[in-house]
Amino acid sequence: MTYKLVRTIIYTSFALVLAIANNVSAQEATYKQTEFSQKQVSNDLSFLYQSLTKTHYNAFAYVSQAQYEAKYQQLRQLVDLKKRWTLLEVTSLYQQLAAIIRNGHTEIDFPAEVYIAYAQAGGTVFPFEITFDIHRALITHNYSEKGEIKAGDELLAINGKSLDEVLDSIYPLISAERHYFKQTKLEALSFPRYYWQVYGEEKTFSVTVMDQDSNEQTLVVNATPVIHGFEMQREEVLNATRKLSFYGDIAYLNPGNFSGDEIEFEEFIRNGFKQINQRRIKSLIVDLRNNAGGNDSFSNYLVSFIADKPFKWSSKFQLKTSRLLKDDTQKHRDITQPYWQQVMEHPSGSIYEYDFGLYEPQPVEQRFKGQVIVLINRQTHSQSAVTAAQIQDYGWAVIAGEETADLPSLYTSQFSFQLPETGITVKVAKGKITRISGSEALKGVLPDIYLKPDITSGDDNVLSSAVSLLKEKALTEAPPN
C-alpha cells in the first residue's frame, strides 16, 4: 500500500517549467477560470459532507460531530450568498470542510491548475518564503528587489495585517492534526502560493520585518513574477534525492522518496549497501529529511539492510471499506490481490485489521552491521516518518534532527474520489497505522539527538553535526547493531 503526502507541488513546478519550455507568454495565455452555478456548488458540498464521514476511518477522532456540522452549515450559508463560483473559490470552500477533520491525509489539494493558468498569464506573488521557529516566521528566501532583507529576518506584518492575522486566513485551508503540521505543510507548498490563493494578486506589499539585531522596519516591496521571479528561482522543500557519498569511513545514503520505479529503487539500495560493505564502512547516515514518503514496500527494502531479525513496519494496520472505496478499487486496482480482495469482500462501513506479515532481513553478509544515524526533520512525511519510527522502535539506529510534523501513528492510506458536479478531487484516509511501539500519542517521531537546522548559514549544519558525532564516537545513545 502507498502512504504519501500528495505532491501537488511536483505537478505545479513541472507544469510551470513545461510552460516556460513551450514559450508560453503573458500575451498568449489567458486567465479565465471555470465557473459553477450555486446549485452545483451546493450539491457537491452536500456530497462532500456525507462522503467524508462514510469513507474516513474515523472522521471524529480529533473533532466532534457537532463541530463538523457547524462548519458545514457555515459553508452552506456562504454558498447561498453567490450565484456563480470560480474553481478557485470552490476549492477554497471545500478545503475548509476537509480540513476541519484535522487529519493531514484527508485533504483537497492546492488549486494547482488555477495557479498555473494565473502564472502563465503573467501573474505575480509575494516575494518572500518563510519557515517557522515555534511562533516566529523567519524569511528563508528573498525574491524581491530589497537586498537588505536577509535570511533569518522575522516577518511581522503584511499590508497592515499582523502575520498571525494573515496565517489565520490561510490555515483553515490546510489539513493537519496539529498546528505544527499546518506550519510544515505551508512551508512545503510555500507561503507565496497560499497567500495568492487567499488574497489574490497584489502588485506591492507593505511589509514589516525585524532583523537579527531586533531592528524593526517597514518598507514597500514589489510582487515578483510567478514563473521567472519565483518558481524558476527556487528549490522545492520536499527535495529528497537518491544519493550515496562518503566522508572518510562514514557513508551517507539518501534513498529519495519511497515511490517511483520500485526495481530502480531496489537496485540503487542494493548497490549502495554493496559499496558500503566493500569499503568496510563503520558508520552510516541515512537521510530521511524533506522526504514526501511513499510506499512501505520501498521503505521495508531499505530497512532490510540494517535489520537483524524479521520485522514489520507497523504493529497494527486497520482499514475501513466503503462504497466509494469499492468503486475506486474496482476501477483502478488488481482485485485478485488479497489486500484488495478484502476491501471488496468486507461490508461497506466495516473496519477490519489487515496483516502484512513479517518482512525478512537481507542475508547476513549483505547487511550493514555498523553504527547507523537516521536524520529526520519536520519535512519527514508519511511513510518516511513511519519508517523512522519503525527503525527507532526496533533499536536499529539513533534518530537525529528535529521532531517530524507528521505522526508515526496516524490515519492515512489515502484513496481519492471526485465530486460529481465540480470534478474536484478529494483525498481521504481510509486506514489507521499504529507504530511498532504501540504508542498512539499525538506526537511526531522524536529524535534521540536534537539537531536544529541553521537557515542563515547556507550549509547543511545538521549533516555536518551528524558526521562530527560519528567521528567523535559521541553517540552514547547508540544501540548495538
Image: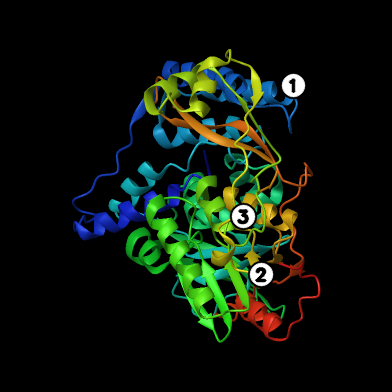
Viewer-nearest of discs 1 and 3: 3
From where the camera sits, is residue 235 visible?
Answer: no
Report the Cα–Cα distance between label 3 and label 2. Answer: 23 Å
Report the Cα–Cα distance between label 1 and label 2. Answer: 45 Å
Asked which secondary structure carries label 2, the reply is strand
Left or right of 373? Residue 367 is left
Viewer-nearest of discs 3 and 2: 2
Q: Position of residue 198 (x, y in %)?
A: 51, 45
Q: Are marks 1 and 2 in contact (CB under 8 Å)?
A: no
Quadrant position of the C terminus in the picture: bottom right
Asked which secondary structure carries label 3, the reply is helix
Compared with residue 303, is residue 477 higher up or lower down, i.e. above or below?
Answer: below
- Lower position in the chain sequence, tag 1 or tag 2: 1
Residue type, numbered disc 1 = Ala
Residue in the image at 46% along x and 22% along y: 41
Residue type, numbered disc 3 = Thr
Residue 184's label in the rendered image is: 3
Viewer-nearest of discs 1 and 2: 2
Residue type, numbered disc 2 = Ile
Report the Cα–Cα distance between label 1 and label 3. Answer: 28 Å
Compared with residue 387, is residue 456 higher up or lower down, i.e. above or below?
Answer: below
Residue in the image at 56% along x and 70% along y: 140
- Lower position in the chain sequence, tag 1 or tag 3: 1
Left or right of 405? Residue 235 is left
Q: Position of residue 338 (x, y in %)?
A: 51, 27
Residue 66's label in the rendered image is: 1
Query: In this figure, which residue is indicated by the disc labeled 2?
Result: 373
